[in-house]
Amino acid sequence: MVAAPSRTLLLTEELIALDSVTPHDKGCQQRLIKLLEPLGFRCETIESNGVTNLWARRGTTAPVFVFAGHTDVVPSGPPSQWTSAPFQPTVRDGKLYGRGAADMKTSIAAMVVAVEEFVKDHADHEGSIAFLITSDEEGPAVDGTKVVVDMLEERGETLDYCLVGEPTSAHILGDMIKNGRRGSLSGHLIIKGIQGHVAYPQNARNPIHQSAAALAELAAEQWDEGNEYYMPTSFQISNMKAGTGATNVIPGELCIDFNFRFSTASTADGLEARVHAILDKHCLEYDLEWTLSGKPFLTPKGTLSDAVCQSICDETGVKTELSTTGGTSDGRFIAAICPQVVEFGPPNASIHRIDEHVELRHIDPLKNIYRRTLCKLLAKDAP
C-alpha cells in the first residue's frame, strides 16, 4: 500500500506550481498567510517597488525566533530542456522535480508545517515565532529582506535567533549549515590610456601594458589570512575589455570588473584603500567605482547553532559541519538586527539547474529538524 503524501510534500508542490520568478511572488505568501493566521500569527504584507514581503509574528515577548526565506525563484531556462515542466511539480524516481524544489520552497513548506506541529503541542511556548519572507532574494535584493529589516529596526523590534532556509547541505541532509557568509565588494575599473596607431606607439599610451604590473600585484596580494571560520579573502577579475576590434589600434582605455569575497578579517573600506594604493603606486590614470552588495556576517558557535546541529543529529544521526562558504544570502541583512543567524536546508547540487529537485526522503526529516530546533529553544519543558 502506497503511503499518502505528507503535508509538507503537498504544500511544497502547491508552492512550486506558482511560477514566482523573481521578483514576483504569484500568491505564495498569501497561501502562507492563510496557514499562519489561524495559528495566531499577525501577518503584515510589505510592498516595495513590485516586491512582496511578509512579516508574520506569533507572540509579543522574547526570545524571538525567526524563520526566513524567499518565495522567488530564478528563471527556469528553456522548458523544453526539462524532463517535466518546471512549474508542474512532478514526483519521479524518489525525487520531487520543479523550479524552487531545492531553492527554497521545500524549506518554506517545512518551516510552516514544523510551526503547525510545534504550536499544536506547545501553544503556550516561550517567546515569539516569526516569519520573514521575501520575493526579492534571487534578484537585486534591494526591495526585499532589507526593507523589512529596516522597518523592524525603525519600530525597535529585536530578534534573537534566525534560521534561513537556504539549501546548505552538500551531499546528504544536515551535513552542512552556514553560520556566516563572506561579504561581496565589486569594482568597475577604467584604466585610461591614449588611443593610437600600433606603428606609432610613441604617440599613444597602451593601458593594457601600463596596468599589467598593477594587476599582477593585485592578483598576488594576500588581503588577509582569514580566521577560524573563514578562508582568506579572495580577489578575482571577472571581466576585461579593451580595443576597437582592429589589430592596428592601440586601445584608449581598459575596462576591468573585479570582485572581493571578503571575510570578517577585512573591511570594505580597508580593501578599497589598499586597491587605490596599489594603482597609485603604479602611476595609473584611472576611474574606479565601488559596489558593496553585502558585508560579511558570522554567528560563532552558540545557542542557535548548537540547537540546529543537535536537532540534525537527533533526526538523522549526521554530524554537521559549520561553514561560511558560498555566495551571499539575505542573512547578511538580518544579521544587522539579530545576533544569531544560521542557514540550513536541503542539498544544493541541483539549485538553479535544469531539472531542479529535492529527494523525497529529505522532505519530512527537514521539517522535523526545524520543529526540533523550535522545541529546544522555545518549548517550556526544553532541557
Image (tube, rainbow, N blue to C red):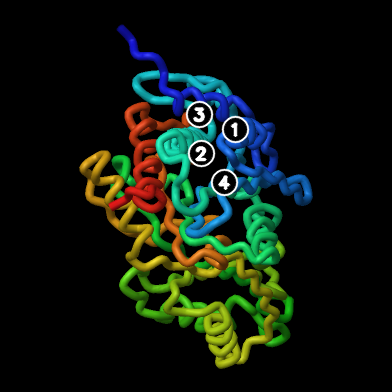
Three-letter code for the amino acid on which mark 1 is drawn: Pro
Which-is-in-front pick, marks 1 and 2?
1
* Mark 4 neighbour density, 10 Å: few (under 14) some (14–19) many (20 or more): many
How far apart in space, not on screen, are marks 4 and 3 (Cα)?
A: 22 Å
Residue positioned 52% across, 27% down in the render? 11
Badge 4 or badge 2: first in the primary sequence: 4
User: Where does the image place residue 314, in percent across and percent down from the top left?
Assistant: 24, 43
**Residue 177 in the image: above or below residue 172:** below
Extreme-right residue of the structure: 49
Q: Secondary structure at mark 2?
A: helix
How far apart in space, not on screen, are marks 1 and 2 (Cα)?
A: 17 Å
Residue positioned 63% across, 87% down in the render? 284
Three-letter code for the amino acid on which mark 3 is drawn: Thr
Q: Is residue 233 left or right of residue 77?
A: left
How far apart in space, not on screen, are marks 4 and 1 (Cα)?
A: 11 Å
Which-is-in-front pick, marks 4 and 3?
4
Badge 4 or badge 3: first in the primary sequence: 3
Label placed on residue 12: 3
Residue 286 at least partly seen? yes
Relative depth, front residue between 135 and 108: 108
Residue carrying label 4: 58
Residue carrying label 2: 108
* Mark 1 neighbour density, 10 Å: few (under 14) some (14–19) many (20 or more): few
How far apart in space, not on screen, are marks 3 and 2 (Cα)?
A: 8 Å
Residue 135 at least partly seen? no
Residue carrying label 1: 38
Three-letter code for the amino acid on which mark 4 is drawn: Arg
Q: Is residue 357 left or right of residue 199?
A: left
Which-is-in-front pick, marks 4 and 2?
4
Relative depth, front residue between 314 and 12: 314
Residue positioned 47% across, 71% down in the render? 262
